């Protein structure tokens, strides 16, 4: 939709999120009032989603911070907090598996 106003940027929500404030306020490439309002609302929605994602990450880290399995998994090279949390969520204690 930005291309309709000759505004080209890379694809991806995180890129658009970073660039929207600059695009909305750019005096050299004015958007129509309706388009400016639409993109401003899009930015507000993306900001709310970004906040929710960060809250969820913070909450899961807080819950798992003192979990021995969570900390042990992170000792594996290339495994960070997000992959460790997903692993714990997927396999829990692993007792549901008959063998390794």
Image (cartoon, rainbow, N blue to C red):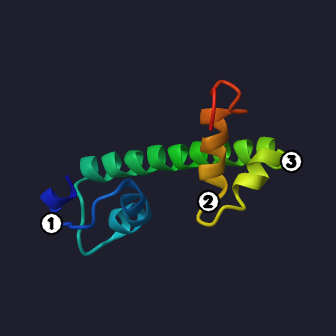
| Relative side of 67 to 90, left or right | right
User: Quarter of the image holding residue 18?
Assistant: bottom left
97 displayed left or right of 11: right
User: Residue placed at 67% from the left, 55% from the top?
Assistant: 81
Find numbered disc 2 in the image and state the secondary structure of the residue it sits on: loop
For label 1, the residue is: 6
What residue appears at the point 54 percent right and 44 percent down from the top-left corner?
A: 48
Q: Foreground mark, 1 or 3? A: 3
Using the image as rendered, state which of residue 26 and residue 85 is in the foreground.
85
Q: Which is more toward the observer, 41 or 78?
A: 78
Q: Secondary structure at mark 3?
A: loop
The CA distance from mark 1 to mark 2 is 41 Å
Mark 1 or mark 2, earlier in chain: 1
Q: Which residue is mark 3?
A: 66
> Mark 2 sits on what residue?
79
Q: Mark 1 packing: few (<14 Cα in 10 Å), some, or many (20+)?
A: few
């Amino acid at each position: 939709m930005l291309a309709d106003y000759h505004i080209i940027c890379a694809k991806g929500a995180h890129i658009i999120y970073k660039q929207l404030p600059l695009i909305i306020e750019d005096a050299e490439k004015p958007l129509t009032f309706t388009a400016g309002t639409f993109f401003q609302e899009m930015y507000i929605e993306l900001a709310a989603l970004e906040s929710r994602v960060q809250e969820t990450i913070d909450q899961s880290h807080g819950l798992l911070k003192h979990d021995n399995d969570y900390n042990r998994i992170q000792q594996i090279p290339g495994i960070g907090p997000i992959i460790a949390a997903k692993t714990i969520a997927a396999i829990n204690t692993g007792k549901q598996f008959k063998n390794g």
